[in-house]
Amino acid sequence: MSLFVTFNDKMSGDFTGEREDDMNRYDEVLVALRRIIRATDMHSRQLSKVSGLTAPQLLILQLLRQHGELTVGEIAHGVNLSQATVTTIIDRLAKRDLVRRERGSSDKRKVFVHLTEAADAVLADAPKPLQDSFIQQFQDLHDWEQTMILSSLERVAYMMDAQHIDASPVLDVGQLDRTDQNH
Amino acid sequence: MSLFVTFNDKMSGDFTGEREDDMNRYDEVLVALRRIIRATDMHSRQLSKVSGLTAPQLLILQLLRQHGELTVGEIAHGVNLSQATVTTIIDRLAKRDLVRRERGSSDKRKVFVHLTEAADAVLADAPKPLQDSFIQQFQDLHDWEQTMILSSLERVAYMMDAQHIDASPVLDVGQLDRTDQNH
DNA sequence: CTCAAATACTTAGAGTTGTAAATATATTTA
DNA sequence: TAAATATATTTACAACTCTAAGTATTTGAG
């Protein structure tokens, strides 16, 4: 417990630190999430100022560098964005000649995207899609702390992704104690 | 460990599950964060379809209900958004007559925002700003798990918020073991 | 083979979001 | 008090993001 007190201390100047006593645990989760989301957003803009690339743009470029050539759909899946979103981002990247589109020859519905030489140059000295300071601090944590944090994040992601509840009534074995809301 | 295996199992169909072996721990953090951010966004849109209110709109309304009357700046601070963002959201809420603006009388720079009667009605049967399914699952966790997750989230938020590094060399006492990056 | 359904992508439209610049008001300094 | 500085909001702008609808192409059923 005392391990984390420091962090709460740091927040006590905040508005949210006024301790609404009607705050549930999950409300605090929400607050933390909003802080994270905002920090992510702000970092993306910071990135954009420094390197000319926003976080999603950078992510997509890096994914392409890893895989060489991907369809729009594959990219969308790879970076966890909708296809429509990827299309618009690719538009911007293409306009700056960092990627090029190529209609599939066998299947003409597909659109393959690949990097240009210009992109390689840009990517060479592009910053990380996460705050350096974050990486720094994260790396300095004990291994078990990193594991714990990562597990927690994955767990939150999983719980927020309601899919697994209504989508697959097949493999629910771990949900038995919760499911009796229905009868 | 085995506690979380289930979650990793569920992800194994994913593109990202292909185990890029050059993936760092923090890259996985990034992936988890993107999943969370996306889930949050999608829930917001879901909310909007069901209740006519997006998550930030709902958050602002709830904050106002708690506090009665707040300035734009206070709201921004309270929900962790920039003032400009709050302004545009208030615009939309005002257009739908859910809030009203009132220029401060003593300090005319300030703009006070308060709910209308219409808002009370809307808020009465508005859903939560977090997925019900998430809340459900979260509540069902053991207390220590909730604590761990919340701590982890707060810790991530804290680490992402680079402020505390360059902004306040004053109150760094808990950062000693990390700060030696400098010398 | 033909038509319906599925797949892949793009377009349209709207909300969220931040930064920077513009406005208006208040406070402080000379 | 006048000018400089600080504070509070808004406006302008650009990017991201989704869903839904539209287009093109492929696949499958009959």
Image (cartoon, coloured by chain):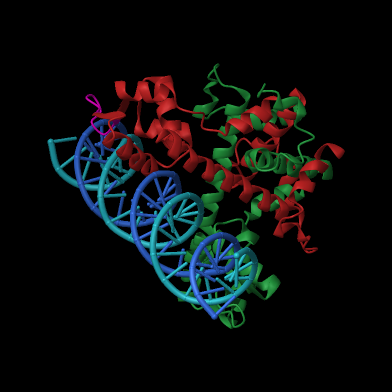
Chain colours: A green, B red, C blue, D cyan
Question: Does C20 appear above or below A65?
Answer: above
Q: Is residue A52 visible?
A: no
Residue A166 position by quadrant: top right
Residue A77 position by quadrant: bottom right
Q: Is residue A31 visible?
A: yes
Judge from the rendering whether residue A6 lies leftward or rightward of residue C10; answer left or right.
Answer: right
Residue at (63% x, 39% y) in the render = A160
Position of the C terminus of chain A by quadrant? top right
Judge from the rendering whether residue C26 lies leftward or rightward of residue B122; answer left or right.
Answer: left
The spot of residue A38 in percent (x, y) is 52, 45
Residue at (54% x, 39% y) in the render = A34
The spot of residue C18 in percent (x, y) is 45, 49
Q: Which residues are magenta?
A: B103-111
Q: Nearer the viewer, residue B182 or A21?
A: A21
Question: Does A9 appear above or below B6?
Answer: above
- Residue B12 counted in the magenta span: no
Residue at (49% x, 61% y) in the render = A84
Position of the N terminus of chain A by quadrant? top right
Question: Does B176 appear above or below A80?
Answer: above
